[in-house]
């Protein structure tokens, strides 16, 4: 299978080439990542607190199978992407690959070899 052609680093003024999906060369990826992480609130502030851990654990016990592909679920996804909305109808059990694909953090190639995504209209 052919590899992705190299692109120029997304960091302003950098002429280095990279094949990474995030678009940054090895020199500029860490500063970019650190900048993003410092702007982001911690998990507790974003709504992932002790109550969420309990709700997540219950959901995975009740529904241990990924709704997209049928694999073992390890994550619980909020359909409306609002972590404060823990209504049972808003929660879906998912495996890591399908969850990443749903958020656009992966692509169809990353799901290759994984069970076919059925799609539940998220």
Image: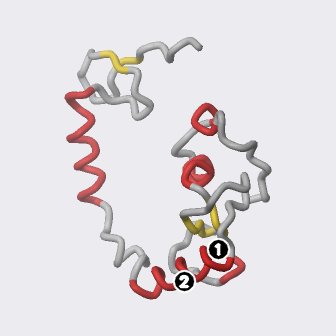
Numbered label attached to residue 91: 1
Q: Splitting the image into 4 quarters, where does residue 51 fall? A: bottom left
Report which residue position mark 2 lands on.
55
Crowd tier of the residue under label 1, counting other residues whose Cα lies within 10 Å: few below 14, some 14–19, many 20 or above:
many
In the image, residue 49 above or below residue 91: below
Q: CA distance from mark 1 to mark 2?
A: 10 Å
In the image, residue 7 above or below residue 10: above
Q: Splitting the image into 4 quarters, where does residue 111 fall? A: top right
Residue at 78% x, 58% y is 121
Q: Earlier in the sequence, mark 1 or mark 2?
A: 2
| SS of the residue under disc 1 | strand
Residue at 55% x, 41% y is 106
Q: Nearer the viewer, mark 1 or mark 2?
A: 2
> Is the residue under label 2 in contact with that under label 1 (CB below 8 Å)?
yes
Residue 67: x and y in percent read 72, 61
Residue 49: x and y in percent read 39, 82
Q: Is residue 49 toward the left or the right of residue 54 in the image?
A: left
Q: Is residue 111 toward the left or the right of residue 27 in the image?
A: right
Crowd tier of the residue under label 2, counting other residues whose Cα lies within 10 Å: few below 14, some 14–19, many 20 or above:
some
Quarter of the image with the N terminus is top right
Between residue 28 and residue 70, name the one nearer to us. Answer: 70
Q: Splitting the image into 4 quarters, where does residue 73 fall? A: bottom right
| SS of the residue under disc 2 | helix
């Amino acid at each position: 299978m052919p590899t992705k052609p190299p692109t120029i680093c997304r960091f302003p003024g950098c002429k280095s080439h990279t094949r990474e999906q995030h678009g940054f060369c090895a020199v500029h990826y860490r500063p970019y990542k650190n900048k993003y992480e410092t702007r982001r609130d911690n998990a507790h502030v974003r709504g992932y607190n002790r109550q969420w851990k309990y709700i997540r654990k219950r959901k995975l016990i009740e529904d241990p199978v990924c709704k997209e592909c049928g694999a073992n679920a390890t994550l619980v996804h909020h359909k409306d992407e609002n972590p404060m909305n823990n209504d049972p109808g808003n929660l879906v059990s998912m495996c890591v690959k399908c969850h990443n694909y749903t958020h656009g953090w992966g692509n169809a190639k990353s799901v290759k070899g994984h069970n076919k995504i059925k799609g539940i209209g998220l």
